[in-house]
Amino acid sequence: MQIKLSAIVGAVAVMMAGGSVYAQDLVVKIGHVGPTSGAIAHLGKDNENGARMAIDDLNAKGVKIGGKKVKFELMAEDDAGDPKQATSVAQKLVDEKVNGVVGHLNSGCSIPASKIYFDAGIPQISPSSTNPKYTRQGYKTAFRVVADDVHLGGTLGKYAVQQLHGKSIAVIDDRTAYGQGVADEFEKGAKAAGGKVVGREFTNDKATDFTSILTSLKAKKPDVIFFGGMDAVAGPMLRQMKQLGIEAKFMGGDGICSEELPKLAAGTMGDGQVVCAEAGGIDPKDAAAVKEMSDFRARFKQKFGADVQLYAPYAYDSVNLLATAMEKAGSADPKKYLPVLAKTTGFHGVTGMISFDNKGDIKNGALTLYTYKGGNKEMLGVVR
């Protein structure tokens, strides 16, 4: 009787230690890294919440890998948008033996961290890094679910000339891997479309005073100003453009294309003044896909009490891509499921269909162009 009682107590202890997970269940750790502190913490938290929602949905569904029921766990880390901190937390996740990583948010962090994941053989999917270098280092563990800066910046450069009729264009970047990369591609695209770049200036990703560079550019009378950087810098820049009487159109990549931008600009944005592009997007003519994204956004707001800022749906799809590859491979061992992940074709995500090319880039990635009216973000159209 005493032996039986001890066995029962032991079994209960195992069940309590693992919550609802029994001893024979498989625990799969998914790392997520983004800046959940600092100026763009709202975007980092957006990504983390997207990943967390995917983890919760997978656990509710009851996924099995290799015949074993799985409990997915999210190992969330903060890189503060700093490359040094990014490599530190990447090593921490490797030491914790995560099965896969979603992140990092910005290219300046994803690129140095990718070497650490590659050396450990751990698959990494960035839901938002767009610098081409990220997937061109020869690291077979690096993937992304959004179009890169060559596509995004080039498309915006062409749009500035052909649609906004920009005759004199100025370019500013924040000297990060993302900001400089997208600005370079924008400049190439604008020049290829016949535009004239009258000035190129730079700042940094923590700056708040742009009086000097804006005054310099004002003298050149640009009708379009492109900024390569994030919304936390773009907002104050727009305020100072207003103060200096610069009425140029303001353009940027997905880094500025957030719901927060009107607040950060403190009501100084004119209707239609800002045009930005988000990597990814769903064709408005695809009613089923539009409804699926709408449902996702509604569920997200109900769960977290906040609207989707930018990349949360891509983080959500990234987690599900990892889980699907594990299911197909019958294993959560990175060595075994990585080749399956690399061959992903026609994965149906909330952001659309995802297939990877031989570099780990999404094939035929979409871009969504937006503007702002009355403080609200409005879609202009989807291009590929």
Image (spheres, helix red, strand yellow):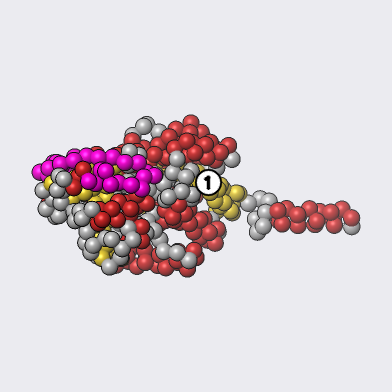
Asked whether residue 159 is drawn in magenta, I would say no
State the image coordinates of residue 71 (x, y, percent, origin top left). 58, 53
Instruction: Locate the N terminus and report the quarter of the image it occupies.
Output: bottom right
Q: Determine if residue 357 is in view.
A: no
Which residue is under mark 1? 77
State the image coordinates of residue 279 (x, y, percent, origin top left). 31, 51
The residues colored magenta run 186-215
Q: Nearer the viewer, residue 192 or 93?
A: 192
Residue at x-position 39% and y-position 58%: 309
Residue type, numbered disc 1: Glu
Q: Is residue 35 left or right of residue 96?
A: left
Which secondary structure, mark 1?
Answer: strand
Residue at x-position 44% and y-position 33%: 115
Residue 42, located in which quarter of the rendered image? Answer: bottom left
State the image coordinates of residue 338 (x, y, percent, origin top left). 45, 40
Q: Nearer the viewer, residue 186 or 295?
A: 186
Q: Is residue 78 left or right of residue 237?
A: right
Residue at x-position 33% and y-position 35%: 133
